[in-house]
Image: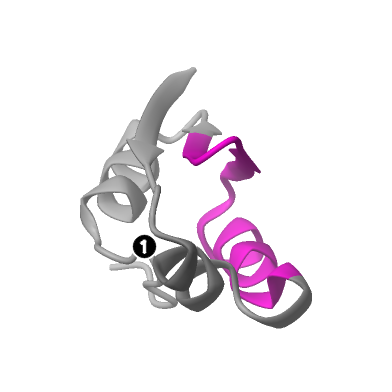
Amino acid sequence: MAERTLSVDDVREQRLLFGSLDRNLRAIRERWGVSVSARRGNLRIAGDDEAAVREVAKSSPPLPLSHS
């Protein structure tokens, strides 16, 4: 299983990234098939598809909704 952790300390960036009621995090989970969790300023991305985890992690903020 591949895993990446990103630091998201800025509250405004967190709001943009997570979306209303964490809608954006759910969209990332559903579209990319990865687990996404946010705790204490860290965003953890994990999944069996290393390419998907890497793609989500390299986006800033990680909101890609299309998988190539």
Which residue type does callout 1 highlight?
A: Pro
For the point 51% across and 57% down, which residue is it? 32
Q: Is residue 29 above or below residue 43?
A: below
Q: Which residue is mark 1?
A: 62
Image coordinates of residue 8 in percent, x first then y, are 39, 49
Residue 35 lies within the magenta run:
yes
Q: How is the image coloured?
A: one colour
Quarter in which the C terminus is drawn: bottom left
Residue at figure coordinates x 37%, y 72% from the top left: 64
Q: Residue 30, how many percent across, how many down?
A: 66, 63
Determine whether 18 is above or below 5 in the image.
below
Q: Is residue 59 above or below residue 16?
A: above
Q: Residue furthest top?
A: 1
- Mark 1 residue crowding within 10 angstroms, few (<14) / some (14–19) / many (20+): some
Foreground of the two, 51 or 8: 8
- Left or right side of 23 for 45: left
Q: Which residues are magenta?
A: 22-45
Q: Position of residue 39 (x, y in %)?
A: 63, 36
Callout 1: SS: loop
Task: Give the camera-side residue of 16 and 62.
Answer: 16
| Position in image of residue 33 (x %, y %) | 59, 51
Q: Is residue 45 left or right of residue 38?
A: left
**Count of numbered circles on the image:** 1
Q: Residue at x 25, y 63 (%)?
A: 60
Which residue is found at the position 62% from the left and 71% from the top? 27
